[in-house]
Image (cartoon, helix red, strand yellow):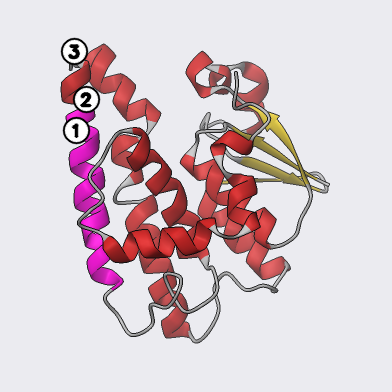
Amino acid sequence: MHKLYSFFRSSAAFRVRIALNLKGLDYETIPVHLLKGEQREAGFLALNPAGLVPVLIENGSLLTQSLAIIEYLDETRPAPALLPGSALDRARIRALALAIACEIHPLNNTRVLKYLVRTLGVDEAAKNAWYRHWVEQGLASVERQLDHPSTGRFCHGDTPTLADCCLVPQIFNARRFDCSLDHVPTVMRVFEHCMALDAFQRAAPAAQPDAEQ
């Protein structure tokens, strides 16, 4: 049994939940409520000094950072592969994943939005405009990258990969903030294929034990 320190709306934790489900691994969810500041409590900081979720514990070993956790799971449980194919295939999958995890997500995560409001004095409308701008622009870039022969039912080929683990949570966030998604039809087609799978459905925010907190 794995222990996953998670927050139901965390994109990064969502990615890892998807990967664990795709790998068929059981895990216990330990909620860390980011909006209540539980990530800054001493007990959690002892696990992850960065004060971020997810944290995965496997047989006493502790792992942090969602993409590092997913790659670890893929190396230790090769099937089904989340980084399949040739070195070029894997590079493309990582590039798609990083386009979301590094180029879109950091600009609209909870810490950034709180800083905009509490420190810089940005009002709610301006904060939401910031969010929508970066998400819509970032997903447009992903859409262009998906205009590629290797794109199939999923971001790369016809089985889910690391890229899909990153894409789906970003779309959930985009919808929560009423972002326009009409300009990314391939992104949304891939999203719908993902959400037809049980592994993605069980990882969704509404399916988590802390969703009503």
Relative horizontal placement of residue 9, taking residue 208 as reference (left or right): left
Q: Residues within 10 Å of mark 1 (few under 14, many from 20)?
A: some
Residue 95 part of the magenta-drawn span: no
Name the secondary structure under disc 1: helix
The residue at which mark 3 appears reads as 121
User: From this viewpoint, is residue 69 visible?
Assistant: no
Residue 143: give x, y in percent of width and height. Answer: 26, 64
Q: Amino acid at mark 2?
A: Lys
Q: Residue at x 38, y 82 (%)?
A: 150
Badge number at residue 183: none
Q: Residues within 10 Å of mark 3 (few under 14, many from 20)?
A: few
Q: Residue at x 45, y 74 (%)?
A: 153
Stretch of the chain drawn in magenta: 128-146
Q: Are marks 1 and 2 in contact (CB under 8 Å)?
A: yes
Distance, label 1 to label 2, CA atoms, is 5 Å
The residue at which mark 2 appears reads as 127
Quadrant of the image occupied by residue 3: top right
Q: Amino acid at mark 3?
A: Gly
Q: Residue at x 68, y 30 (%)?
A: 209
Q: Is residue 74 above or below residue 172?
A: below
Name the secondary structure under disc 3: loop
Q: Is residue 48 above or below residue 167?
A: above
Residue 61: give x, y in percent of width and height. Answer: 75, 47
Quadrant of the image occupied by residue 133: top left
Question: Which is more foreground, mark 3 or mark 2?
Answer: 2
Relative horizontal placement of residue 188, taking residue 193 as reference (left or right): left
Relative horizontal placement of residue 112, taking residue 193 as reference (left or right): left
Distance, label 3 to label 2, CA atoms, is 10 Å
Which secondary structure type mostly characterizes the magenta part of the structure? helix
| Residue closest to the eye, 200 or 111 | 200
The residue at which mark 1 appears reads as 130
